[in-house]
Amino acid sequence: MNNINELLRKLPSIDKLLKHPEAISLTQKFPREIVVSSLREVIENKRNIIRQMGHINTQELREDLLIQKAEEIANAKTAWTLRRVVNATGVIVHTNLGRSLLPDEAIRRIASISSGYNNLEYDLEKGCRGSRYVHAEKLLRELTGAEAALVVNNNAAAVFLVLNTIAKGREVIVSRGELVEIGGSFRIPDVMASSGAILKEVGCTNKTHLSDYELAINENTIAILKVHKSNYKIVGFTDEVSLSELVETARKHNLYCLEDMGSGCFVDLTPYGIKDEPTVRWELQTGVHVITFSGDKLLGGPQAGIILGKKEIIEKCKKNPMTRAFRVDKLTLSALEATLKLYLDEEKAKQQIPTLQMISASIGELEKRAGNLAEQLKKHGDSDKVEIKVEKVISRVGGGAAPTAELPSRAVTISSHIFSPQTLEHYFRTYDPPIIIRIENNKIYMDVRTLLKDDDDHIVSAFQEFMRNLSSRL
Protein backbone atom coordinates (compact mmCIF):
# COMPACT_ATOMS: atom_id res chain seq x y z
CA MET A 1 0.00 0.00 0.00
CA ASN A 2 2.83 2.36 0.83
CA ASN A 3 4.30 1.74 -2.62
CA ILE A 4 0.94 2.57 -4.24
CA ASN A 5 0.60 5.79 -2.26
CA GLU A 6 4.14 6.74 -3.15
CA LEU A 7 3.43 6.23 -6.85
CA LEU A 8 0.18 8.18 -6.64
CA ARG A 9 2.06 11.09 -5.09
CA LYS A 10 4.38 11.09 -8.12
CA LEU A 11 1.47 12.02 -10.39
CA PRO A 12 1.75 15.74 -11.19
CA SER A 13 -1.19 18.03 -10.49
CA ILE A 14 -3.24 19.49 -13.33
CA ASP A 15 -2.07 22.99 -12.37
CA LYS A 16 1.56 21.93 -12.63
CA LEU A 17 0.99 20.29 -16.02
CA LEU A 18 -0.75 23.38 -17.35
CA LYS A 19 2.41 25.41 -16.66
CA HIS A 20 4.54 23.09 -18.76
CA PRO A 21 5.61 24.71 -22.10
CA GLU A 22 4.06 21.88 -24.12
CA ALA A 23 0.74 22.27 -22.28
CA ILE A 24 0.83 26.05 -22.83
CA SER A 25 1.30 25.33 -26.52
CA LEU A 26 -1.62 22.92 -26.35
CA THR A 27 -3.96 25.60 -24.97
CA GLN A 28 -3.23 27.67 -28.07
CA LYS A 29 -4.33 24.77 -30.26
CA PHE A 30 -7.41 23.69 -28.28
CA PRO A 31 -9.87 25.43 -25.94
CA ARG A 32 -8.53 25.45 -22.38
CA GLU A 33 -11.50 23.38 -21.12
CA ILE A 34 -10.64 20.61 -23.62
CA VAL A 35 -6.98 20.61 -22.55
CA VAL A 36 -7.90 20.46 -18.85
CA SER A 37 -10.41 17.62 -19.28
CA SER A 38 -7.93 15.69 -21.45
CA LEU A 39 -5.18 16.04 -18.84
CA ARG A 40 -7.61 14.88 -16.15
CA GLU A 41 -8.42 11.77 -18.20
CA VAL A 42 -4.72 10.98 -18.57
CA ILE A 43 -4.02 11.40 -14.85
CA GLU A 44 -7.12 9.40 -13.89
CA ASN A 45 -6.04 6.60 -16.23
CA LYS A 46 -2.56 6.43 -14.64
CA ARG A 47 -4.13 6.56 -11.17
CA ASN A 48 -6.34 3.58 -11.98
CA ILE A 49 -3.40 1.59 -13.36
CA ILE A 50 -1.43 2.20 -10.15
CA ARG A 51 -4.36 1.19 -7.94
CA GLN A 52 -5.17 -1.94 -9.94
CA MET A 53 -1.64 -3.14 -10.77
CA GLY A 54 0.21 -1.84 -7.75
CA HIS A 55 3.05 -0.63 -9.97
CA ILE A 56 3.79 1.43 -13.08
CA ASN A 57 6.81 2.29 -15.17
CA THR A 58 7.82 5.66 -13.78
CA GLN A 59 8.82 6.75 -17.29
CA GLU A 60 5.08 6.86 -18.05
CA LEU A 61 4.72 9.63 -15.45
CA ARG A 62 7.01 12.04 -17.28
CA GLU A 63 5.18 15.33 -17.78
CA ASP A 64 5.95 15.59 -21.49
CA LEU A 65 4.59 12.09 -22.14
CA LEU A 66 1.44 12.80 -20.12
CA ILE A 67 0.86 15.96 -22.14
CA GLN A 68 1.43 14.08 -25.41
CA LYS A 69 -1.25 11.59 -24.37
CA ALA A 70 -3.56 14.47 -23.48
CA GLU A 71 -3.02 15.91 -26.95
CA GLU A 72 -4.15 12.61 -28.49
CA ILE A 73 -7.30 12.72 -26.35
CA ALA A 74 -7.92 16.37 -27.26
CA ASN A 75 -7.57 15.54 -30.94
CA ALA A 76 -10.14 12.75 -30.54
CA LYS A 77 -12.52 15.05 -28.65
CA THR A 78 -12.42 17.73 -31.34
CA ALA A 79 -12.23 15.52 -34.44
CA TRP A 80 -14.96 15.78 -37.07
CA THR A 81 -17.42 12.90 -36.94
CA LEU A 82 -18.75 13.62 -40.43
CA ARG A 83 -15.79 13.43 -42.80
CA ARG A 84 -15.05 13.34 -46.50
CA VAL A 85 -14.08 9.87 -47.76
CA VAL A 86 -12.86 8.46 -51.07
CA ASN A 87 -15.41 6.07 -52.56
CA ALA A 88 -13.57 3.32 -54.45
CA THR A 89 -16.37 0.75 -54.02
CA GLY A 90 -18.01 1.23 -57.42
CA VAL A 91 -21.40 1.86 -55.76
CA ILE A 92 -22.50 5.22 -57.16
CA VAL A 93 -25.31 6.19 -54.78
CA HIS A 94 -23.73 4.64 -51.68
CA THR A 95 -26.18 4.97 -48.81
CA ASN A 96 -23.45 4.64 -46.17
CA LEU A 97 -21.19 7.15 -47.91
CA GLY A 98 -23.64 10.03 -48.27
CA ARG A 99 -25.53 8.87 -51.38
CA SER A 100 -25.54 11.31 -54.32
CA LEU A 101 -22.78 13.88 -54.81
CA LEU A 102 -23.96 17.40 -55.53
CA PRO A 103 -23.13 19.15 -58.80
CA ASP A 104 -20.61 22.00 -58.56
CA GLU A 105 -23.37 24.45 -59.43
CA ALA A 106 -25.42 23.28 -56.43
CA ILE A 107 -22.41 23.65 -54.12
CA ARG A 108 -21.81 27.19 -55.36
CA ARG A 109 -25.48 27.98 -54.89
CA ILE A 110 -25.45 26.71 -51.31
CA ALA A 111 -22.42 28.90 -50.54
CA SER A 112 -24.09 31.94 -52.09
CA ILE A 113 -27.42 31.50 -50.30
CA SER A 114 -25.97 30.52 -46.91
CA SER A 115 -23.45 33.37 -46.75
CA GLY A 116 -26.14 36.07 -46.64
CA TYR A 117 -29.79 36.74 -46.08
CA ASN A 118 -32.29 35.43 -48.63
CA ASN A 119 -35.98 35.46 -49.54
CA LEU A 120 -36.76 32.01 -48.13
CA GLU A 121 -40.18 33.15 -46.93
CA TYR A 122 -40.41 36.64 -48.40
CA ASP A 123 -42.35 37.63 -51.53
CA LEU A 124 -40.12 40.11 -53.36
CA GLU A 125 -42.90 41.20 -55.73
CA LYS A 126 -45.50 41.91 -53.06
CA GLY A 127 -43.10 43.01 -50.34
CA CYS A 128 -44.62 40.74 -47.68
CA ARG A 129 -44.29 37.30 -46.12
CA GLY A 130 -44.11 34.52 -48.69
CA SER A 131 -43.92 30.74 -48.77
CA ARG A 132 -40.81 28.58 -48.86
CA TYR A 133 -42.72 26.04 -50.91
CA VAL A 134 -42.63 28.16 -54.07
CA HIS A 135 -38.89 27.60 -54.43
CA ALA A 136 -38.12 24.84 -56.95
CA GLU A 137 -41.84 24.29 -57.62
CA LYS A 138 -41.84 26.09 -60.97
CA LEU A 139 -38.85 24.07 -62.20
CA LEU A 140 -40.39 20.80 -61.06
CA ARG A 141 -43.60 21.58 -62.93
CA GLU A 142 -41.67 22.59 -66.03
CA LEU A 143 -39.51 19.47 -66.05
CA THR A 144 -42.24 16.94 -65.29
CA GLY A 145 -45.53 18.41 -66.48
CA ALA A 146 -47.02 18.17 -62.98
CA GLU A 147 -49.80 20.53 -61.93
CA ALA A 148 -48.14 21.25 -58.58
CA ALA A 149 -45.15 20.29 -56.46
CA LEU A 150 -44.10 20.21 -52.82
CA VAL A 151 -40.63 19.52 -51.41
CA VAL A 152 -40.17 17.93 -47.97
CA ASN A 153 -37.15 16.45 -46.22
CA ASN A 154 -37.18 12.88 -47.60
CA ASN A 155 -39.31 10.41 -49.52
CA ALA A 156 -40.58 8.60 -46.42
CA ALA A 157 -41.92 11.96 -45.20
CA ALA A 158 -43.46 12.59 -48.63
CA VAL A 159 -45.35 9.27 -48.58
CA PHE A 160 -46.41 9.82 -44.97
CA LEU A 161 -47.65 13.34 -45.66
CA VAL A 162 -49.72 12.37 -48.69
CA LEU A 163 -51.36 9.44 -46.89
CA ASN A 164 -51.95 11.44 -43.71
CA THR A 165 -53.56 14.22 -45.76
CA ILE A 166 -55.96 12.23 -47.92
CA ALA A 167 -56.20 8.74 -46.42
CA LYS A 168 -56.25 9.04 -42.61
CA GLY A 169 -58.71 6.48 -41.28
CA ARG A 170 -59.37 5.12 -44.78
CA GLU A 171 -58.14 2.04 -46.62
CA VAL A 172 -55.30 2.17 -49.15
CA ILE A 173 -54.79 -0.88 -51.37
CA VAL A 174 -51.22 -2.12 -51.96
CA SER A 175 -49.92 -5.28 -53.62
CA ARG A 176 -48.15 -7.69 -51.26
CA GLY A 177 -45.28 -7.79 -53.70
CA GLU A 178 -44.72 -4.05 -53.18
CA LEU A 179 -44.58 -3.85 -49.38
CA VAL A 180 -40.94 -2.81 -49.46
CA GLU A 181 -38.46 -2.19 -46.69
CA ILE A 182 -36.01 0.62 -47.33
CA GLY A 183 -32.73 1.44 -45.58
CA GLY A 184 -32.70 1.57 -41.79
CA SER A 185 -35.61 -0.92 -41.50
CA PHE A 186 -38.25 1.62 -42.56
CA ARG A 187 -41.13 -0.30 -44.06
CA ILE A 188 -44.06 0.83 -46.20
CA PRO A 189 -46.60 -0.83 -43.82
CA ASP A 190 -45.08 1.02 -40.86
CA VAL A 191 -45.09 4.38 -42.66
CA MET A 192 -48.71 3.81 -43.65
CA ALA A 193 -49.75 2.85 -40.11
CA SER A 194 -48.06 5.94 -38.68
CA SER A 195 -49.86 8.14 -41.22
CA GLY A 196 -53.24 6.87 -40.06
CA ALA A 197 -54.01 5.14 -43.36
CA ILE A 198 -55.28 1.55 -43.21
CA LEU A 199 -53.26 -0.91 -45.28
CA LYS A 200 -55.27 -3.31 -47.44
CA GLU A 201 -52.94 -5.99 -48.86
CA VAL A 202 -53.90 -7.74 -52.08
CA GLY A 203 -52.44 -10.46 -54.28
CA CYS A 204 -49.43 -12.64 -53.57
CA THR A 205 -45.74 -11.86 -53.27
CA ASN A 206 -45.00 -12.85 -56.85
CA LYS A 207 -48.34 -12.22 -58.58
CA THR A 208 -51.02 -9.58 -58.23
CA HIS A 209 -53.87 -9.24 -60.74
CA LEU A 210 -56.17 -6.33 -61.50
CA SER A 211 -59.08 -8.37 -60.14
CA ASP A 212 -57.31 -8.50 -56.74
CA TYR A 213 -57.49 -4.71 -56.51
CA GLU A 214 -61.10 -4.53 -57.71
CA LEU A 215 -62.31 -7.18 -55.25
CA ALA A 216 -60.68 -5.30 -52.35
CA ILE A 217 -62.48 -2.01 -53.03
CA ASN A 218 -65.20 -1.16 -50.52
CA GLU A 219 -66.94 1.89 -49.08
CA ASN A 220 -63.92 2.71 -46.87
CA THR A 221 -61.37 2.57 -49.72
CA ILE A 222 -59.83 5.93 -50.60
CA ALA A 223 -56.80 5.10 -52.75
CA ILE A 224 -54.65 2.59 -54.59
CA LEU A 225 -50.92 2.89 -53.93
CA LYS A 226 -48.30 1.49 -56.30
CA VAL A 227 -44.80 1.18 -54.86
CA HIS A 228 -41.95 0.97 -57.34
CA LYS A 229 -39.65 -1.93 -56.42
CA SER A 230 -36.57 0.23 -56.64
CA ASN A 231 -34.37 -1.78 -54.27
CA TYR A 232 -35.20 -5.37 -55.23
CA LYS A 233 -36.52 -7.47 -58.10
CA ILE A 234 -38.88 -10.44 -58.10
CA VAL A 235 -38.11 -12.79 -60.97
CA GLY A 236 -39.59 -16.01 -62.29
CA PHE A 237 -43.34 -16.72 -62.19
CA THR A 238 -44.44 -13.12 -61.65
CA ASP A 239 -47.09 -10.64 -62.68
CA GLU A 240 -48.06 -7.15 -61.61
CA VAL A 241 -50.57 -4.53 -62.64
CA SER A 242 -49.28 -1.52 -64.55
CA LEU A 243 -49.68 2.01 -63.25
CA SER A 244 -51.91 2.98 -66.18
CA GLU A 245 -54.30 0.10 -65.36
CA LEU A 246 -54.43 1.16 -61.71
CA VAL A 247 -55.10 4.78 -62.73
CA GLU A 248 -58.03 3.63 -64.84
CA THR A 249 -59.38 1.42 -62.04
CA ALA A 250 -59.10 4.25 -59.54
CA ARG A 251 -60.89 6.62 -61.93
CA LYS A 252 -63.71 4.12 -62.44
CA HIS A 253 -64.27 3.80 -58.68
CA ASN A 254 -63.68 7.47 -57.86
CA LEU A 255 -60.47 6.73 -55.90
CA TYR A 256 -57.05 8.31 -55.76
CA CYS A 257 -54.15 6.55 -57.47
CA LEU A 258 -50.77 7.21 -55.85
CA GLU A 259 -47.25 6.06 -56.68
CA ASP A 260 -44.14 5.89 -54.52
CA MET A 261 -41.36 5.87 -57.12
CA GLY A 262 -38.55 5.72 -54.57
CA SER A 263 -35.92 7.09 -56.94
CA GLY A 264 -36.94 9.98 -59.15
CA CYS A 265 -35.45 9.63 -62.61
CA PHE A 266 -35.64 12.58 -65.04
CA VAL A 267 -33.71 11.12 -67.99
CA ASP A 268 -33.93 7.83 -69.87
CA LEU A 269 -31.16 5.61 -68.52
CA THR A 270 -31.78 2.57 -70.76
CA PRO A 271 -28.75 3.39 -72.98
CA TYR A 272 -26.58 2.71 -69.92
CA GLY A 273 -28.15 -0.63 -69.03
CA ILE A 274 -30.73 0.64 -66.54
CA LYS A 275 -34.03 -0.62 -67.94
CA ASP A 276 -36.44 -0.70 -65.00
CA GLU A 277 -36.42 2.96 -63.95
CA PRO A 278 -39.27 4.93 -65.57
CA THR A 279 -38.96 8.70 -65.82
CA VAL A 280 -41.13 10.92 -63.65
CA ARG A 281 -42.67 12.67 -66.66
CA TRP A 282 -43.65 9.33 -68.20
CA GLU A 283 -45.34 8.18 -64.99
CA LEU A 284 -47.27 11.42 -64.59
CA GLN A 285 -48.64 11.08 -68.12
CA THR A 286 -50.63 8.03 -66.95
CA GLY A 287 -52.87 10.39 -65.01
CA VAL A 288 -51.72 9.25 -61.58
CA HIS A 289 -52.89 11.67 -58.89
CA VAL A 290 -49.65 11.90 -56.91
CA ILE A 291 -46.07 10.67 -57.28
CA THR A 292 -43.41 10.82 -54.57
CA PHE A 293 -39.66 10.24 -54.91
CA SER A 294 -36.26 11.22 -53.53
CA GLY A 295 -34.34 14.36 -54.42
CA ASP A 296 -31.02 12.57 -54.38
CA LYS A 297 -30.50 8.98 -55.64
CA LEU A 298 -31.02 8.98 -59.43
CA LEU A 299 -32.01 12.64 -59.51
CA GLY A 300 -28.55 13.49 -58.18
CA GLY A 301 -29.55 16.41 -55.95
CA PRO A 302 -29.74 16.89 -52.17
CA GLN A 303 -31.66 14.54 -49.90
CA ALA A 304 -35.30 15.58 -50.12
CA GLY A 305 -38.76 14.16 -50.70
CA ILE A 306 -40.61 15.46 -53.74
CA ILE A 307 -44.39 15.31 -54.12
CA LEU A 308 -45.80 15.93 -57.60
CA GLY A 309 -49.31 15.71 -58.95
CA LYS A 310 -52.78 17.17 -58.85
CA LYS A 311 -52.94 20.69 -57.48
CA GLU A 312 -55.88 20.05 -55.15
CA ILE A 313 -53.96 17.30 -53.32
CA ILE A 314 -50.70 19.24 -53.15
CA GLU A 315 -52.52 22.26 -51.71
CA LYS A 316 -54.08 20.06 -49.02
CA CYS A 317 -50.64 18.68 -48.18
CA LYS A 318 -49.25 22.20 -47.80
CA LYS A 319 -51.96 22.99 -45.24
CA ASN A 320 -51.37 19.81 -43.23
CA PRO A 321 -49.78 20.74 -39.86
CA MET A 322 -47.28 17.89 -40.32
CA THR A 323 -45.77 19.72 -43.31
CA ARG A 324 -43.93 22.03 -40.91
CA ALA A 325 -42.27 19.02 -39.28
CA PHE A 326 -41.09 17.82 -42.68
CA ARG A 327 -40.11 21.14 -44.22
CA VAL A 328 -36.76 21.68 -45.88
CA ASP A 329 -34.31 24.49 -45.21
CA LYS A 330 -32.71 27.09 -47.47
CA LEU A 331 -29.65 24.91 -48.15
CA THR A 332 -31.68 21.98 -49.46
CA LEU A 333 -33.89 24.22 -51.57
CA SER A 334 -30.95 26.09 -53.07
CA ALA A 335 -29.13 22.85 -53.96
CA LEU A 336 -32.27 21.27 -55.39
CA GLU A 337 -33.10 24.30 -57.52
CA ALA A 338 -29.54 24.41 -58.89
CA THR A 339 -29.67 20.69 -59.72
CA LEU A 340 -33.05 20.99 -61.42
CA LYS A 341 -31.85 23.88 -63.57
CA LEU A 342 -29.22 21.60 -65.08
CA TYR A 343 -32.00 19.28 -66.28
CA LEU A 344 -33.34 22.02 -68.55
CA ASP A 345 -30.55 20.85 -70.87
CA GLU A 346 -30.37 17.04 -70.65
CA GLU A 347 -26.86 16.80 -72.09
CA LYS A 348 -25.66 19.41 -69.63
CA ALA A 349 -27.24 17.41 -66.81
CA LYS A 350 -25.41 14.24 -67.85
CA GLN A 351 -22.10 16.11 -67.94
CA GLN A 352 -22.43 18.09 -64.70
CA ILE A 353 -24.48 15.95 -62.29
CA PRO A 354 -22.01 13.47 -60.71
CA THR A 355 -24.54 10.64 -60.41
CA LEU A 356 -25.35 10.82 -64.12
CA GLN A 357 -21.68 11.30 -65.01
CA MET A 358 -20.75 8.09 -63.23
CA ILE A 359 -23.66 6.11 -64.66
CA SER A 360 -22.89 7.19 -68.21
CA ALA A 361 -19.08 6.81 -68.04
CA SER A 362 -17.80 4.75 -71.00
CA ILE A 363 -15.65 1.64 -70.72
CA GLY A 364 -12.97 3.49 -72.68
CA GLU A 365 -12.82 6.25 -70.07
CA LEU A 366 -12.77 3.76 -67.21
CA GLU A 367 -10.09 1.60 -68.84
CA LYS A 368 -7.83 4.60 -69.36
CA ARG A 369 -8.28 5.88 -65.84
CA ALA A 370 -7.70 2.48 -64.25
CA GLY A 371 -4.57 2.00 -66.34
CA ASN A 372 -3.17 5.38 -65.28
CA LEU A 373 -3.87 4.69 -61.60
CA ALA A 374 -2.32 1.23 -61.79
CA GLU A 375 0.86 2.61 -63.37
CA GLN A 376 1.18 5.26 -60.66
CA LEU A 377 0.76 2.65 -57.91
CA LYS A 378 3.31 0.30 -59.49
CA LYS A 379 5.98 2.97 -59.03
CA HIS A 380 5.68 2.46 -55.26
CA GLY A 381 5.06 -1.28 -55.08
CA ASP A 382 7.88 -3.82 -55.46
CA SER A 383 6.66 -6.29 -58.09
CA ASP A 384 8.20 -9.15 -56.07
CA LYS A 385 5.97 -8.26 -53.14
CA VAL A 386 2.87 -6.69 -54.67
CA GLU A 387 0.77 -7.48 -57.74
CA ILE A 388 -1.18 -4.55 -59.19
CA LYS A 389 -3.57 -5.18 -62.06
CA VAL A 390 -6.55 -3.71 -63.91
CA GLU A 391 -9.54 -6.06 -63.86
CA LYS A 392 -13.06 -6.13 -65.22
CA VAL A 393 -15.71 -5.58 -62.53
CA ILE A 394 -19.37 -4.66 -62.16
CA SER A 395 -20.41 -1.32 -60.67
CA ARG A 396 -23.80 -0.78 -59.03
CA VAL A 397 -26.13 2.21 -58.94
CA GLY A 398 -26.90 1.66 -55.23
CA GLY A 399 -29.09 3.79 -52.99
CA GLY A 400 -32.11 1.54 -53.46
CA ALA A 401 -32.19 2.16 -57.20
CA ALA A 402 -31.93 -0.22 -60.18
CA PRO A 403 -31.09 -3.30 -58.06
CA THR A 404 -30.45 -5.60 -61.01
CA ALA A 405 -28.58 -3.13 -63.22
CA GLU A 406 -24.98 -4.16 -63.84
CA LEU A 407 -22.61 -1.45 -65.07
CA PRO A 408 -19.43 -2.94 -66.61
CA SER A 409 -16.46 -1.17 -65.10
CA ARG A 410 -12.73 -1.40 -64.37
CA ALA A 411 -10.96 -1.69 -61.05
CA VAL A 412 -7.37 -1.54 -59.91
CA THR A 413 -6.61 -4.58 -57.75
CA ILE A 414 -3.79 -5.06 -55.25
CA SER A 415 -2.68 -8.39 -53.81
CA SER A 416 0.43 -9.50 -51.94
CA HIS A 417 2.02 -12.45 -50.18
CA ILE A 418 3.66 -10.01 -47.74
CA PHE A 419 0.50 -8.44 -46.28
CA SER A 420 -3.18 -9.38 -46.19
CA PRO A 421 -5.85 -7.37 -48.05
CA GLN A 422 -7.41 -6.67 -44.63
CA THR A 423 -4.18 -4.95 -43.53
CA LEU A 424 -4.19 -2.60 -46.52
CA GLU A 425 -7.96 -2.05 -46.25
CA HIS A 426 -7.55 -0.99 -42.60
CA TYR A 427 -4.70 1.34 -43.51
CA PHE A 428 -6.72 2.96 -46.30
CA ARG A 429 -9.83 3.23 -44.10
CA THR A 430 -7.92 4.99 -41.32
CA TYR A 431 -6.03 7.30 -43.68
CA ASP A 432 -6.98 10.98 -43.88
CA PRO A 433 -9.28 11.26 -45.68
CA PRO A 434 -10.29 7.59 -45.50
CA ILE A 435 -10.30 5.46 -48.67
CA ILE A 436 -13.15 2.98 -48.79
CA ILE A 437 -12.49 -0.10 -50.93
CA ARG A 438 -13.86 -3.64 -51.17
CA ILE A 439 -12.15 -7.02 -50.70
CA GLU A 440 -12.80 -9.99 -52.97
CA ASN A 441 -10.75 -13.04 -53.94
CA ASN A 442 -8.10 -12.18 -51.34
CA LYS A 443 -7.28 -8.83 -52.96
CA ILE A 444 -8.50 -5.27 -52.69
CA TYR A 445 -10.56 -3.73 -55.47
CA MET A 446 -10.75 -0.02 -56.28
CA ASP A 447 -13.45 0.63 -58.87
CA VAL A 448 -12.52 3.81 -60.74
CA ARG A 449 -16.12 4.60 -61.73
CA THR A 450 -16.77 6.28 -58.37
CA LEU A 451 -13.41 8.03 -58.01
CA LEU A 452 -13.30 11.81 -58.32
CA LYS A 453 -10.70 13.87 -60.13
CA ASP A 454 -8.21 14.26 -57.28
CA ASP A 455 -8.79 10.86 -55.65
CA ASP A 456 -6.08 9.13 -57.70
CA ASP A 457 -3.31 11.28 -56.23
CA HIS A 458 -4.63 10.67 -52.73
CA ILE A 459 -4.72 6.89 -53.24
CA VAL A 460 -1.18 6.91 -54.62
CA SER A 461 0.09 8.93 -51.64
CA ALA A 462 -1.61 6.57 -49.19
CA PHE A 463 -0.18 3.49 -50.91
CA GLN A 464 3.30 5.02 -51.07
CA GLU A 465 3.21 5.69 -47.33
CA PHE A 466 1.88 2.20 -46.63
CA MET A 467 4.69 0.58 -48.60
CA ARG A 468 7.29 2.82 -46.95
CA ASN A 469 6.06 1.83 -43.48
CA LEU A 470 5.96 -1.81 -44.52
CA SER A 471 9.56 -1.72 -45.78
CA SER A 472 10.78 -0.22 -42.51
CA ARG A 473 9.27 -3.16 -40.60
CA LEU A 474 10.66 -5.90 -42.88
Image: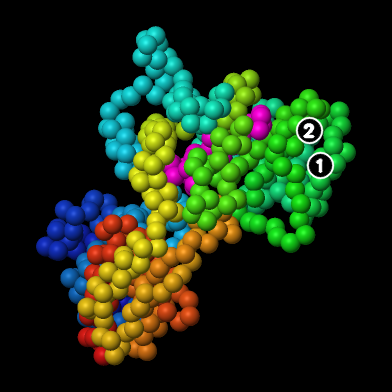
Q: Quadrant of the N terminus?
A: bottom left
Left/right of residue 38 with respect to residue 323 in the rendered view? left
Q: Cα distance, mark 1 to mark 2?
A: 8 Å
Q: Nearer the viewer, residue 388 or 462?
A: 388
Left/right of residue 300 with respect to residue 265 in the rendered view? left
Q: Is residue 331 visible?
A: no
Extent of the magenta region: 286-306
Q: Nearer the viewer, residue 219 or 355?
A: 355
Q: Is residue 234 visible?
A: yes
Q: Residue at x 16, y 53 (%)?
A: 28
Q: Residue at x 84, y 43 (%)?
A: 212
How are the residues colored? rainbow
Determine which residue is flagged by label 1. 210
Percent across and percent down for residue 106 are 35, 39
Q: Residue at x 46, y 60 (%)?
A: 91
Q: Disc 2 on helix, strand or loop? A: helix
Left/right of residue 402 with respect to residue 340 in the rendered view? right
Percent across and percent down for residue 301 are 43, 42
Determine which residue is flagged by label 2. 249
Q: Nearer the viewer, residue 49 or 234?
A: 234
Q: Nearer the viewer, residue 141 or 433?
A: 141
Residue 7 sits above or below residue 148 on the image: below
Where, by quadrant of the figure, is residue 386 drawn? bottom left
Would you say residue 310 sits in the magenta stretch? no
Left/right of residue 162 with respect to residue 214 in the rendered view? left
Q: Disc 1 on helix, strand or loop? A: helix
Sequence-earlier tag: 1 or 2: 1
Q: Residue at x 70, y 58 (%)?
A: 234
Residue 104 sits above or below residue 217 on the image: below
Residue 362 sits above or below residue 437 on the image: above
